[in-house]
């Protein structure tokens, strides 16, 4: 088994470093460095100076300073050189373990808090809208009165004569209006429904929205930001993170815009409304 001094010399020679080079860098005389390699400790100042020489020598060569300090203490038979190092290593290990455990607890708590916050903020909203959307689609409103009498005459609505449905010309009292033929109803002109877009943000994303050619939104949004845009004909939207936005058009939640991190654009018109041809 090689000794402390031989280990120092071997490590130095393996790296091709001369004692003069170490002396110039550490400001320790060549005589003291030779004494370390020869384990001539009686030629050294002693005490903390010797340990300082060992630490500087090992540090310059890129060696484990604590290991060589412990080896020096064993060779020099100085318990005061070994015990503080071992105790310091034990304290350092305990401190690192405690810090690691605290960091793990903080990370887990942060993740749990973030998930709970998102669930409370967006979970009821998204689920409620999806439920309302399903209920609305399941109910088919009837716009045509049903006759209360089976076998009623064609063209009769089953209502009293005073409540009979009349053509718009008669209702409005326009001149020249004539009753519609029996069994025939007039077609009402289609009416346009205003586009109403609700934008909920689940993550940080840059959103640009143009309504009827007018720029409404162009900024970086973060949770719990929420925006609402209305237009008559067209809404154009672009998101730098497609998965970070939840879009609701006139009460109907739209499918996801895209995958996480994907930049996507979307154009909404009257054709995207439920019930419009």
Image: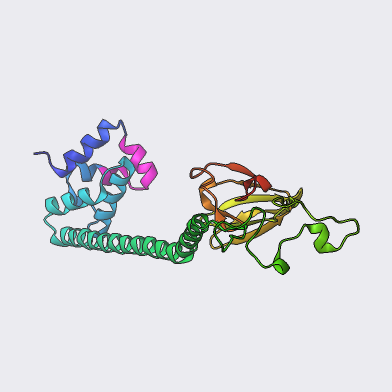
Q: Is residue 275 magenta?
A: no
Position of 154 with respect to 102 (left or right) is right
Looking at the image, which residue is at 31% across and 60% down? Answer: 104
Main secondary structure found in the magenta portion: helix
Q: What span is in magenta?
A: 18-33
> Which residue sits furthest right?
175
Q: Residue furthest left?
A: 1
Question: How far across and down, in percent of the image, does residue 60 sit?
Answer: 33, 43
Residue 259 appears in the figure: yes
Find residue 36 and report its image quarter.
Answer: top left
Quadrant placement of the C terminus: top right
Q: Nearer the viewer, residue 164 or 261?
A: 164
Judge whether residue 268 can be spotted in this image. Answer: no
Compared with 277, 128 (above or below) is below
**Which corner quadrant of the image does residue 114 belong to?**
bottom left
* 23 is within the stretch colored magenta: yes
> Which of 144 and 51 lies nearest the eye of the viewer?
144
Scheme by which the image is coloured = rainbow
Residue in the image at 18% along x and 42% along y: 5
Q: Measured from the top left, where is residue 107 in percent x and y?
A: 36, 60
Instruction: State the residue in front, 252 or 152.
Output: 152
């Amino acid at each position: 088994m090689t000794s402390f001094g031989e280990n120092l010399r071997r490590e130095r020679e393996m790296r091709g470093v001369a004692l003069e080079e170490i002396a110039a860098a550490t400001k320790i005389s060549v005589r003291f460095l030779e004494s370390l390699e020869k384990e001539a400790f009686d030629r050294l100042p002693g005490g903390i100076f010797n340990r300082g020489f060992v630490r500087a020598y090992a540090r310059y060569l890129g060696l484990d300073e604590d290991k060589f300090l412990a080896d020096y203490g064993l060779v020099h038979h100085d318990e005061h050189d070994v015990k503080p190092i071992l105790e310091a290593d034990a304290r350092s290990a305990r401190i690192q373990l405690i810090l690691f455990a605290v960091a793990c607890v903080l990370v887990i708590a942060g993740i749990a808090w973030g998930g709970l916050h998102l669930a409370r903020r967006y979970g009821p909203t998204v689920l409620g809208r999806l439920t309302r959307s399903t209920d609305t689609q399941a109910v088919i409103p009837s716009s045509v009165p049903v006759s209360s009498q089976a076998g009623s005459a064609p063209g009769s609505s089953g209502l009293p004569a005073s409540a009979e449905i009349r053509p718009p010309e008669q209702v409005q009292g326009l001149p020249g209006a004539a009753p519609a033929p029996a069994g025939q109803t007039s077609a009402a002109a289609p009416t346009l429904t205003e586009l109403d877009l609700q934008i909920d943000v689940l993550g940080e994303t840059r959103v640009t929205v143009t309504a009827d050619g007018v720029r409404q939104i162009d900024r970086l949004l973060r949770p719990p930001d929420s925006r609402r845009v209305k237009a008559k004909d067209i809404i154009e939207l672009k998101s730098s993170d497609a998965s970070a936005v939840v879009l609701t058009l006139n009460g109907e939640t739209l499918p996801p815009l895209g995958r996480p991190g994907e930049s996507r654009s979307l154009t909404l018109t009257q054709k995207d409304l439920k019930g419009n041809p």
